[in-house]
Amino acid sequence: MSTNKLSNYLKMYRKRLGLTQREMAYLLGCGHGSKVSRYEREKRVPSLITLLAYEFISRRCARELFAGVYASTVGEVRTRVKRLMKQLDAQPFTAVVKRKFESLTEIIYPTSNSRNHKHETNI
Amino acid sequence: MKQTYEMIGPERVLAVDPSAKGFGFVVLEKEPLQLVDWGVASCRRRGSAPCFGRLSSLIEQYKPAALVIDDPSEAKTPRRVALGAFLIQLSEHLEDSGVPTRLYRRSEVMKAFSSIGARTKSDVVQALVDRFPELASRVPRPRQIWEGEDARLSIFDALALAMLHLSIEISTSRQQN
């Protein structure tokens, strides 16, 4: 996952639509163009409702709109998944633990075969 | 301007082209090839501070891997020569901060675009609009003989510089591989 993506691409998608910040603010229902400016400059994080409005207006999913944030979040989640797998590795290998291993392996390696998960914990 | 650029990636470039009123700029990403930002920065106020501030804020915001500038050695008008010289001076300052600068001559750009059949400036603009339709609204109407060049054309000049830079980078990396 590339970490050199911009934190967000809100400005790019707005400019592609040919909209001003004031017009975008009107469409988002957030009142003033300065709020859109703060979203674009990463000074403010949009609410869930605003994010969904952004998705609908730009026809892009949140991970594309916030590519950099998504990449860093994915990196952090991966780290936590690996830590959790190490913790599970110390527990008795029951059916429940096996299922957890499968799920966690699937999170990190979505296409990989997770049957031999017990031996793949030294990541 | 004491900054570190550890997060700089290889794929985003900032291209700047001086115009009569300031400079046109584009921010271009290589993978995928997309136009991230574009516009004309006005430097009408006296002194170099407005130009410097705008360019610095662009670099701060986008953290480009390279700053691509039109080589002013072929510039004809005194203002363009002065602006180009200022940009080079600025780029030297930025190079100390870790942003490498690349200079390309106008003739190099035209030579690169002539390979795809774009021989005049309007052909180049059309080729760029075909690739980046979001710029279609920024194409100025054809100017009359007594009119000066529209400042918006500097956006296309900057984009042509950025495209040339990326194509050279791609061909260089292919040769190395």
Image: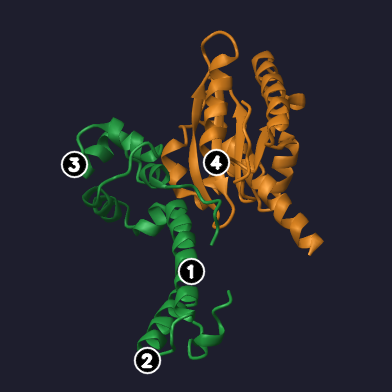
Chain colours: A green, B orange
Specify the amino acid type for callout 1: Arg
Specify the amino acid type for callout 4: Val
For marks 3 and 2, the one nearer the N-term is 3
Gap in Å between the C-alphas at discs 3 and 2?
A: 50 Å
* Foreground tag (1 vs 3): 1
Q: The residue tagged with tag 4: helix, strand or loop?
A: strand
Q: Which residue is mark 4?
A: B27
- Left or right: A110 in relation to B94: left
Specify the amino acid type for callout 2: Ala
Give the image quarter of residue B95: top right
Q: Which mark is residue A95?
A: 2
Q: Is residue B148 visible?
A: no
Q: The residue tagged with tag 2: helix, strand or loop?
A: helix
* Foreground tag (3 vs 2): 2
Q: Which residue is mark 3?
A: A29
Q: Residue at x 41, y 88 (%)?
A: A98
Q: In the figure, B82 relative to B166: above or below? A: above
Q: Which residue is mark 1?
A: A83
Q: Are marks 3 and 2 on the same chain?
A: yes
Q: The residue tagged with tag 3: helix, strand or loop?
A: loop
Give the image quarter of residue B120: top right
Q: Please provide percent x and percent y for residue B173.
A: 75, 58
Observer-nearest of B173 and B161: B173
Q: The residue tagged with tag 1: helix, strand or loop?
A: helix
Specify the amino acid type for callout 3: Gly
* Chain letter of the residue beneath label 1 in the structure image: A
Q: In the figure, B160 relative to B83: above or below? A: below
The quarter in which the C terminus of chain B is drawn is: bottom right
Observer-nearest of B45 and B138: B45
